[in-house]
Image: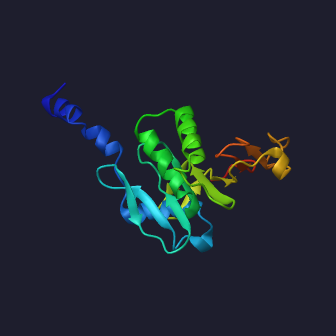
């Protein structure tokens, strides 16, 4: 191995190059894809600074919050949610950053909601999750796009909503985590392939 290659490997040059952070403008353009079209221009947007840290890229003027694509992950995965979900989402991100597991995060937030330390929305609140294999910024086109919907209704149950606990056909709404702070309606349309 020559000295230059050894230096580049030791300094993490290849890793840094592979995880380049897109410009703020490009991150915003991709992040808002998860939001309804009429809410994109005024949405608050989280993305990544040059050090790879999650930060606010744009303050919002409406009730939509968009979470940008993690450049360390393969493909595109962005989400948008109603601002009333921000305390719940922010707490989840903080606990994940502490290294907590999914179950630990669930249990901690459940306890904090019950204790009145963590506020959940008073009304049903929607989360949109947009994913794609790739997104071409030059053309504004994506491949294998998938959009699913989640409507949070804390402590709702199958009995209180009339929804099943699992879907019986593709795309059928159903309730997940019923009776908990994280109770939500899942709407996952059947995926379609596109290029």
Q: Colour scheme in the image?
A: rainbow
In the picture, the quarter occupied by the N terminus is: top left
Q: Residue at x 82, y 45 (%)?
A: 158
Horizontal side of 3 relative to 49 (left or right) equals left
| Quadrant hosting residue 107 | top right
| Quadrant hosting residue 119 | bottom right
Judged from this view, the residue extending furthest toward the front is 115
Residue 182 x, y percent position in the rendering: 64, 46
Q: How many marks?
A: 0
Q: Is residue 168 above or below residue 58?
A: above
Q: Is residue 133 visible?
A: yes
Q: Which residue is nearer to you in this view: 153 or 10?
A: 153
Judged from this view, the residue extending furthest toward the left is 3
Residue 45 x, y percent position in the rendering: 46, 63
Q: Residue at x 65, y 59 (%)?
A: 126
Residue 8 x, y percent position in the rendering: 20, 36
Q: Is residue 163 visible?
A: no
Q: Which residue is nearer to you in this view: 92 or 7?
A: 92
Residue 129 x, y percent position in the rendering: 61, 53
Q: Residue at x 60, y 45 (%)?
A: 114
Q: Residue at x 40, y 37 (%)?
A: 98
Q: Is residue 11 above or below residue 195?
A: above
Q: Which residue is nearer to you in this view: 90 or 114?
A: 114
Q: Which residue is nearer to you in this view: 180 or 25?
A: 180
């Amino acid at each position: 191995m020559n000295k230059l290659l050894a230096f580049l490997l030791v300094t993490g040059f290849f890793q840094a190059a592979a995880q380049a952070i897109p410009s703020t403008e490009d991150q915003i353009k991709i992040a808002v894809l998860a939001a309804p079209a009429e809410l994109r221009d005024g949405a608050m947007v989280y993305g990544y600074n040059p050090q790879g840290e999650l930060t606010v890229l744009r303050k919002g003027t409406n009730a939509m919050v968009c979470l940008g694509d993690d450049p360390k992950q393969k493909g595109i995965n962005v989400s948008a949610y109603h601002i009333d979900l921000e305390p719940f989402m922010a707490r989840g991100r903080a606990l994940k950053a502490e290294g907590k597991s999914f179950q630990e995060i669930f249990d901690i937030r459940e306890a904090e909601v019950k204790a009145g330390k963590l506020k959940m929305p008073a009304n049903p609140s929607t989360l949109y999750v947009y994913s794609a294999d790739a997104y071409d910024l030059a053309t504004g086109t994506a491949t294998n796009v998938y959009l699913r919907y989640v409507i949070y209704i804390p402590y709702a149950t199958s009995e209180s909503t009339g929804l099943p606990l699992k879907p019986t056909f593709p795309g059928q709404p159903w309730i997940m985590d019923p009776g908990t702070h994280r109770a939500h309606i899942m709407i996952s349309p059947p995926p379609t392939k596109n290029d």
